[in-house]
Image: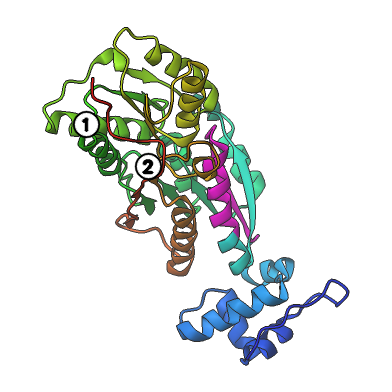
Amino acid sequence: MPLRSRTRKQSAATIKDVAELAGVSAMTVSRVLNDKDKVRPETRDRVLASIEALNYTPNLSARGLVKSRSFFIALFYNNPSQGYVSELLLGLLNRCRQAGYHLVIENCGPKESDWEGGIDAMLAASHFDGVILTPPVSDYSSVRAALAEAQLPYVCIAPEKEIGAAPFVETDDFVSAAGMTRHLIELGHQRIGFIKGPPEHGSSAKREAGFRAAMREANLPVSEECVVSGDYSYRSSLEASEALLALTQRPTAIFASNDDMAAAVIATAHRHALSVPDDLSVAGFDDTQIAATIWPHLTTVRQPIEAMAETAMDLLSEAWKADRAPEKAQGIVIPSELVIRDSVAGRKAE
């Protein structure tokens, strides 16, 4: 059955409209909206496609009265990379729309102390049905303790380590960073600069560890003057890349811990009249939108940010179905992949 979209002039779609378009009963649509298990996958897909085609929005107030829910999900995050945040929101908003939930976004302080005295009051006043924590907030023990005390389901995205019984989703930052470093080594680079992220983000330490492990594996020394700090922002990497390019023996390649910082490296190289990749190879991490818009296009690690966000929402949905705290953490690891573009080349012969 072909799917037809409503025009703006038409009245808002109802659950009966969705049922008619999908060729199912209104009860079946209700089951899909409320995440009931007894719906065949092909039927669920047809209902979701009809919801999308009709731009149907469930009546959250009515559903909340029946199920004692607010139908609001909170995202707690702190990340200076707009590209990362954009992809994160894309995945979460997509899943929330499908499930009939609203997303509340809380931009948190970068340090756990920023939460002191405020988290309990916020949770009491907000009536969230669940919370998704992103790094570094996913590693804040005080926040997790407050959520547990409030008996509020939550899911962690990319925590530094497995945390109690909370479900989590992540990619393997260590393995991915090691893979990118090996790629640079295979192209002949031996003196490689590395720009690490902020210490409060667990991914920062894992990516640096992966870089160092690959260098050690190749019996290549890591010059500590070639390892500099950033904070995942473009601005922080302008200073970091200046320090690397000012070295008497500058690196032939620089691996930045995220794409925003890699973009700043390329900008700094251009200011120094260095050609990328002929004079300097540059690699990043995340594969956010900036990777394909800067010139040259960035060789990077594609982190499945949108997929991790969608999976986090799925894990939260499973927690609601279980209606009890899990006894053991459910962790899902989604692999990253190397994306080879134009910012990296073989080392020039000296």
Residue 275 position in % (x across, y down) = 43, 25
Q: Earlier in the sequence, mark 1 or mark 2?
A: 2
Is residue 92 rendered magenta in the image? yes
Check disc 1 and report the residue beneath it: 188
The answer to whether 216 appears left or right of 26 in the picture is: left
For the rendered model, the colour scheme is rainbow
Q: Nearer the viewer, residue 162 or 22?
A: 22
Packing grade of label 2 (10 A; few <14, some 14-19, many >=20) is many
Disc 2 marks which residue?
159
Instruction: Check disc 2 and give the amino acid type.
Output: Pro
Above or below, comparing residue 316 to residue 343 in the picture: below
Q: Is residue 39 visible in the rendered structure shown here?
A: no
Badge 1 amino acid: Gly
Residue 317 is tagged as none
Q: Is residue 167 left or right of residue 47?
A: left
**Distance of label 1 from label 2 (alpha carbons):** 34 Å
Q: Residue 163 at x, y = what percent?
A: 33, 44
Residue 114 makes an appearance in the image: yes
- Furthest residue in direction top, as rendered: 248
Q: What segment is highlighted magenta in the picture?
A: 70-93
